[in-house]
Image (cartoon, helix red, strand yellow):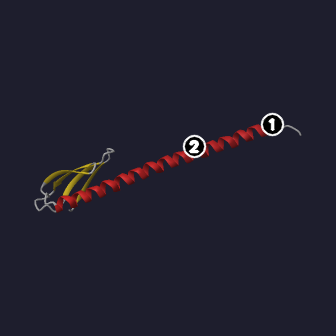
Amino acid sequence: MKTNAFTLPFTIFIAFITILIVTGSASIFKTQIQYEKMIQNYYLASTKLNLALIQTKESSLLSGDFKINYGDADVTCQATDSSLATFNCKITLQNGYTLTKTTNP
């Protein structure tokens, strides 16, 4: 078999392309995981906030300003008007995620 100077550069080129593909895929996967965690934290905080407001409303503790602990989350709400129809609420989860939301109980 005759040797040539084309085989080594071609092999290195294929290896380089393969490394780029694997690195790019890992980067896309990492970004996707970060977005999924953000979405999960948002829905968890939103759900806990809604449940905390329901619990507060049922126990007749709904006032202008209130602070409660719901599970492992701290919920602080302030009324935006005197009719107690709208609240600005801030919820902080145990993992440090904070959500600020205007809601109607």
Q: Is residue 3 above or below residue 94?
A: above
Q: Quadrant of the N terminus?
A: top right
Q: Amino acid at mark 2?
A: Thr
Q: Is residue 13 rendered to the left or right of residue 52? A: right
* Front position in the image: 91 or 72: 72
Q: Residue at x 56, y 46 (%)?
A: 24
Q: Is residue 44 rendered to the left or right of residue 17? A: left
**Residue 64 position within the rendered picture, expressed as x and y whole percent measured from the top left:** 12, 55
Neighbours of disc 1 within 10 Å: few (<14), some (14-19), many (20+) = few
Q: CA distance from mark 2 to mark 1?
A: 29 Å
What is the number of the mark on residue 58? none
Q: Residue at x 28, y 56 (%)?
A: 48
* Front position in the image: 100 or 68: 68
The residue indicated by pointer 2 is 23
Q: How many marks?
A: 2
Q: Amino acid at mark 1?
A: Ala
**Which is closer to the viewer, label 2 or label 1?**
2
Q: Quadrant of the C terminus?
A: bottom left
Residues at badges 2 and 1 in contact (C-beta under 8 Å)?
no
N-terminal-most mark, 2 or 1: 1
The residue indicated by pointer 1 is 5
**Residue 98 position within the rendered picture, expressed as x and y whole percent measured from the top left:** 29, 48
**Residue 71 position within the rendered picture, expressed as x and y whole percent measured from the top left:** 27, 51
Q: Residue at x 56, y 48 (%)?
A: 25
Mark 2, secondary structure of its residue: helix
Residue 10 occupies which quadrant of the picture?
top right
Q: Is residue 35 rendered to the left or right of residue 3? A: left
